[in-house]
Amino acid sequence: MVSIRVPATIANLGPGFDCLGCALNLYAHFTFEQTTGGLHITGCPPKYRNTNNLVYNAFVAACTTWGVAVPGLSIHINSSIPLSRGLGSSAALIVAGVAAASRLHGLQKNKQDILEIATKIEGHPDNVAPAIFGGLRVSLLEGEKVYTASAPIANSIRFLALVPDFNLTTQESRAVLPDTISWQDGVYNVGHAALLLRALETGNRLLLSNAMSDRLHQPYRFPLISGSKEIARIAREQGADGFCLSGAGPTLLCLYHKNDFPQRMAQALQNVSGNWQLMELEVDRNGLTLLS
């Protein structure tokens, strides 16, 4: 039996569209056990307990790539990561499936090997890279080659995820993005992304408050999330160091340092329509962990 833990992740952090992601201390646990035949999945809604399950598809893709047989399999999923909320639930499933294929077959693949296959399945590395390596990661896809590097992030950086009671698929959020951007917006994001890396490294709150701005995706996606404009205003009033979408949404993300910030946000959000769950999170620095 193989036991695996994978963290939640933020992608598209601030202006880091499709390239900047961070692992969080919120986890999905998986167990995989080889059987004599068939597929048995527990711990997820009934509609996912079949061969269309993403963790199983990732397992099969890895086996196929590495030229090993796909055995009968029993999979149990115990995940605290909300589904389709912009916190990397799909990336966690993919990473777990690929890692399990290596472990069950005794292939001893390293994290870069797992990243290559996980990125092919996911289509981009900004979630799967931090899910595998942990911490803050800068990643890009050059042709079929995946590049990723760790970036320092201050221990003082904390996250408050505001998770709504509705989901937003990546397909929906991608559909509203423009086909082209202006030269000015491109330059704006390059500068802000560079500044954000320094702000996250130093924990400089003044830099953070300015560097989190984005022109490539958030202006188009915020209108899909009811109440987001009002919540952004409230977050600033309550002293958030930064505010952005988590991934493609609909989860909203505050960066903060004051201990009472989550309580003040919870109080302020009582007057906002909708049901928002607040999750106090910190950086996970380990990433994919093989527990057995």
Image (cartoon, helix red, strand yellow):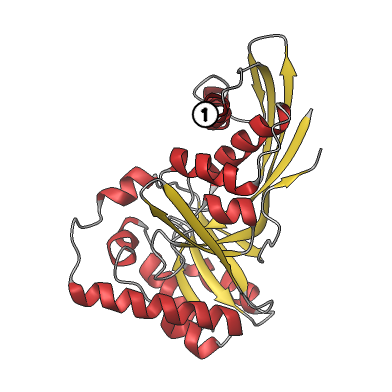
Q: Which residue is mark 1?
A: 65
Q: Please state the horizontal and vertical placement of residue 238, each as a whole percent of the image.
A: 53, 82
Q: Is residue 60 above or below residue 273?
A: above
* Residue at figure coordinates x 52%, y 31% from the top left: 54
Q: Is residue 203 above or below residue 284?
A: below
* Image quadrant in which you'd find residue 185: bottom left
Q: Is residue 41 above or below residue 221?
A: above
For this view, does 161 lie left or right of residue 155? left
The amino acid sitting under disc 1 is Thr
Residue 212 visible: no
Q: Please state the horizontal and vertical placement of residue 99, each as a whole percent of the image.
A: 65, 37
Residue 80 visible: yes
Q: Please state the horizontal and vertical placement of residue 221, each as a whole percent of the image.
A: 32, 59
| Quarter of the rendering occupied by the C terminus | top right
Q: Please state the horizontal and vertical placement of residue 2, each as a whole percent of the image.
A: 76, 32
Q: Residues within 10 Å of mark 1 (few under 14, many from 20)?
A: few
For this view, does 134 lie left or right of residue 171? right
What secondary structure is marked by label 1?
helix
